[in-house]
Amino acid sequence: MTAAGTGTAVAAPMALEVSNLRKVFRVRHGAPGQDELVAVDDVSFSVPRSGSLAVVGESGSGKTTLARMIVGLETPTSGEILLEGQVRPPSTRRRDRAARARQVQMVFQDPYSSLDPKQTVHQCLDEVVRLHFSLDRDARAARVRTLLDQVGLDDRHAGVRPSSLSGGQRQRVAIARALATEPTVLILDEAVSALDVSVQGQVLNLLADLRERLGITYVFVSHDLAVVQQIAETTIVMHRGRIVEEGPTDTILTEPDQDYTRRLLAALPRPGWKPRRRRRVGTDEGE
Amino acid sequence: MTAYDVTSTPRWRRLAGGDPLLLAGAFLLVLMVLIACLAPVLAPYSPSQTDILAANQGPSGAHWLGTDSTGRDIYSRLLFGARLTLLGPTLIIAIATVVGVALAISAVWFGGWYDAAVSRTLNVLFALPGLLVAIVAVAVIGTGLTAPVVALALAYMPYIARVLRSVALRERSLAYVEAGQLVGLSGWAVCRRHLLPNVMPIIRAQATLAFGSALVDLAAVSYLGLGVQPPTAEWGVMVASGQSSLLNGYPWESLTAGVAIVIVVVLVNMVGERLALRAERTP
Amino acid sequence: MTAATPVTPATPAAEALLELTHVSLDIPVRGELRRVIHDVTLTITGGESLGLVGESGSGKSMTARTIMRLIRRGWVAGGSVVFDGEDVYRMDPQRLRRLRGSDIAMIYQDPRAHTNPVRTNGDSLMEGMLAQGMSRDAARQRALELLAEVGIPDGERRMRQYPHELSGGLLQRIMIAAAVSLTPRLLLADEPTTALDVTTQEEVMAILDEQRQERGLAMLVITHDLDLAAAVTDRIAVMYAGVILEVAPSASLHGASRHPYTVGLLASRPVVGTRSRLRTIPGRPLSAFEAGPGCVFASRCPFVAEVCTAERPQLRPMGDHLVACHRVEEIATELADWAEADR
């Protein structure tokens, strides 16, 4: 059993600890009193080393903002993020940048925009390896080959640009790039959502294998409760910026405690499922 | 580099790839530049060699395009004139592009007040009429190539910067740019290695299109007698100095120089349009 | 024209409302014709709901375009599309407008891209009814009724608003109201809920299904989600690389599907409550033009044999399914084992 949210009492080092995280966006031209949007509100959790946590929620739940704060693409309004017990180096100096990159990496949702269209797969991976490890050219090439092999690609894919790869292959390259810095924590932001069903299964299996092999820590952000169980043993459910439920994934999927989680589960198409109108009208205003 | 480098297609081939109009236009332009470079070899006469006895002749075996009012060979002057005529706009566009691209990309990268300041400045520069600034610059610095080139570079820069800023802004929002930052690349490295190569097609197209206008503007400055001074061979100068002969019924100098300008501008614009079209199509 | 092709599904003898017979489509890409649909044969009877399911590049959306004859210059459509006895390919422009404007109503994946952002929702909603000759007052009244039916009680206000003021779910409900306002005979829904959150998806799907059943409309639902399609349809056609590989009753899709692709697709999707390694189909979805002369699925099929790469299998009846597979009889037990392994 992992210890989501139990932070301090646990002796084992936590790969990622988030406490009281809050993010407020200023909304331009907002009405008086509505010029602020609380995207993430008082979120705390922790993930042990080699653990895997899923963050589940619908659009507007704050899950993506949370992920972007963890990797440093957004600055929290308040709260703390500890990676391996340490605060993220704040400066943009080369050493700090590199240290940060080795702490945490991210795989983005859209494999069509997350790779530089002008770079070949080899150039893309070599660039990262060269930046982080002082290896000669042969050693780098070997490392790139290993990375490709880890994600189920080979030399045939190395020389091509992303435009000649399928969505699934691109996402594999994006995973390889993230692994190239040998990070402790890997954030997967809807990493399989844009993929075709038959390919989604492959990538889910790949992610499960990689964690087993490399002992890497995952934070798997997704709107899809069904794929979460393939990846994560612990799950937190977010709604309107707050955590509404957290616990072991299996429990959340089979005996959810909260109404919102139940509603999410009930809405999931599955064999024998029929869609039903359940919400009172008028509640889905907003946007 | 590595064993599996499969990109063996030559660069120019990839640039022009499969577009006959683009290929033909680019070929003709390269030919023009070559001719300009080889003018001393190709020209039958010196561009400044006068011969009063042979003034204002029509085309003949000795003088293919005739002679001007002082008996200089128009064909030779056209060949030599191509050098300055092409060099001027090249300098203008080179300066405008380098400055414009640097401003646009840095504005997009840093955003915030810096971006706002750059955008404001560009808007002010937009309001400046290029030709007028060039004339003022000549008044201050004096005639020659330098003053109009600097002034026109300043006038063309905002056009390139504005288009590029919007393109770079879109590119900047794509995940691969953020991914570059996340793997530890510096902002400079992300801009130079990822952002810049991906907006390059647009830069190429914009620069080419601006080249055509810059050539016309610079020729106009010369025509007004504010740029390169006679007797130096330059097409704008030739159009101007051929005017008196034109009125006397000897159109050859003005006509050939004018036609040469039109041909180059049409070619440049065609190449620019095709490049812009390709830039739009490739992601 | 009546159903006459040997491959017409063994469905009720009811009159066919929409009949696609050996439909193919080629689109020019850099001066070369490229095949996006190889062979689609489908029948929808009046009041029936059919799901057309496939991954990207399968040609499912192109099939919808072909049905509506939304075909651009240079595209080459083959076979025949017959709507209520009339050949869609041969309709004159006026008849075609009627087909698109009132016989068949489309519901798109992205309602925002298909509404005019500078017109109010009310104007967009009433447009079709006005075009059909209804008075403004009557159209307005009808629009309000329809909005209430799709779960929008404050219709007055919503009709005054613009598309950008509404959430995706609300906008899609207005689209459904607009679609049924035309009293069509067939609803053509192309990924109607793909852009929506799951809870909103359930809501919108329920409304769509409700409206269809109340009015006895036929429906063609195009989606990548097998379970979603199965929930609101009578039959499902599974499409891959421009070919229909299997047509099955929606109720017996799970556990009874016969084509290796359908089985693989179902196995690729995790089932809530059973955590086990997923059984996946190797490789990536091919596009129609990449397929060889044989079965389009041959390159990814675990049961591929020599005949599969040589000859393209036709749809043939197997119980209450239609299956395009040479080896469907031989591999029946193997296929069941393959899907269940590790589960």
Image: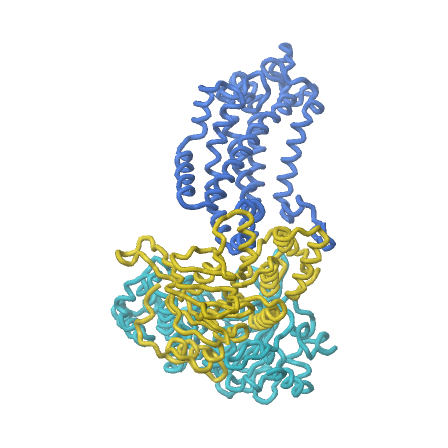
**Which residue is at the front of the view, B140 or C155?**
B140
Q: Is residue A207 above or below residue B197?
A: below
Location of residue C217 with respect to B52 vertically, above or below: below
Q: Is residue C6 visible?
A: no
C307 vs A89, left or right, is: right
Above or below, comparing residue B144 to residue C310 in the picture = above
Chain letter of the blue region: B
Location of residue B30 (image quadrant): top right
Please state the horizontal and vertical placement of residue C282, each as a whole percent of the image: 65, 72
Camera sees residue C178: yes
The C terminus of chain A lies in which quarter of the figure?
Answer: bottom left
In the foreground, C235 or A249: A249
Q: With C213 as the anchor, is A103 left or right in this view?
A: right
Q: Is residue B191 above or below residue A57?
A: above
> Which residue is outermost to the top?
B53
Question: Residue A70 vs residue B83: left or right?
Answer: left
The colour one sees for chain C in the rendered image is cyan
In percent of width and height, residue B271 lies at 58, 41
- Chain A: drawing colour: yellow
